[in-house]
Amino acid sequence: MDALSRLIQLAQLQGNLDVRCQFAGGFAVDHAEAPRGEALFHLVLDGGCAIEPAGEPSLDMQAGDLVIFPHGAAHLIRDRRGQRRTAPVRVEHDGLLPLRRNGDGAPELDLLCGRFRYAPASASLLLYTLPGTLKVSLRDTAGMEALQALVALMRHEAGQRQPGALAVVTALTHALFALALRAYATGDVHGLLPLLADARLGGAVQAMLAEPAHPWTLEELGRVAAMSRASFARHFGERAGMTPGECLARLRMQIAGDLLLRTRRRTGDIGQDVGYQSEAAFGKAFRHYMGTTPARFRREHTREEEHI
């Protein structure tokens, strides 16, 4: 399994569609901050709008644009003209989803709105390192034919409303998230995801994920990346914003957290699975990176994730 797929798996990601919006004229719809463990998203099927994240510049959204709020930030969706008079919004049903409309004529905006639910305790490397607002524009993203095709398919299914359409579109949201992260990773950004897009450095991350218990050294990881020890350490730090050792430790904690929640195995055995020879050493490292003991983490987050 490739590294990005593994991180998505660890996050226990689930995509859900909430509502379809078709607006014309003046409109302004507030979205409150989402609960912990939810990343809100909006996909413009047709037309355009402005989206104003709290405390950030306004985003101009056009057909094919996707915006994700990885941390569930509050935001406003409005018409581009910023009209002060807004028509009341009513809720109908289009045979696929609840439908919000503010008129009976041709809509100027056709928008799919939903959320990605994830296990907060198991998603820190994937979600928490992302910016507060992540926009992917098909017009600006070269080489993203797959993303364009996916959006076209979602638009088609939402428009035709054939039997099973909701199941198809909901399933496609999972792929939409993965492709959006892939597009983000290829930009001029720093963090774990850009490492995965790097032809050589990505192989080192893949190796760490595949064998977290291995006592990886800079020399070994450098060989995986076809670099010298010094060159590997320098390029890794510049791209990721962390050392290879810190990245390995965080990956180990991510995997350990997942095992603590999904299994009833002893913490000492889980610690050995991720490279710690003693339960005490594992517990110390876990407290450092996760802020709590393995036992308390299992107890508290098992209860929490039962409600996700």
Image (cartoon, rainbow, N blue to C red):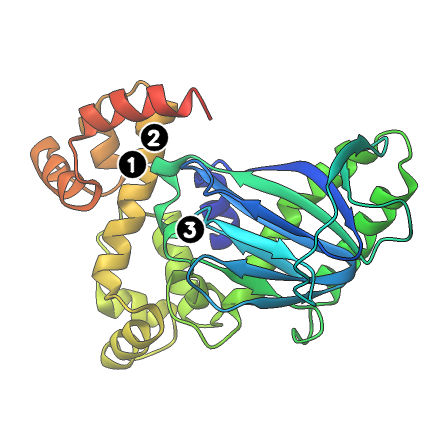
Real-space CA distance between mark 3 and mark 1, rounded to the nearest whole angstrom = 15 Å
Is residue 33 shown left or right of residue 108? left
Q: Amino acid at mark 3?
A: Leu
Categorize mark 3 by other alpha carbons within 10 Å: few (<14), some (14-19), many (20+). Answer: some
Residue type, label 1: Ala
Q: Is residue 77 left or right of residue 191?
A: right
Q: Position of residue 50 (x, y in %)?
A: 64, 63
Position above or below: 266 against 94? above
Q: Are marks 3 and 2 in contact (CB under 8 Å)?
A: no
Q: Residue at x 69, y 66 (%)?
A: 80
Badge 2 density bin: few <14, some 14–19, many ≥20, Cα 10 Å: many
- Give the residue at mark 1: 256
Q: Is residue 198 left or right of residue 240?
A: right
The one nearer the camera, 135 or 144, is 135
Q: Which residue is tagged 3?
A: 126
Q: Which tag, 3 or 2, sits closer to the chain's start?
A: 3
Q: Give residue 104's position: percent from left, percent from top.
A: 89, 44
Residue 203, compared with residue 248, is above or below; it is below
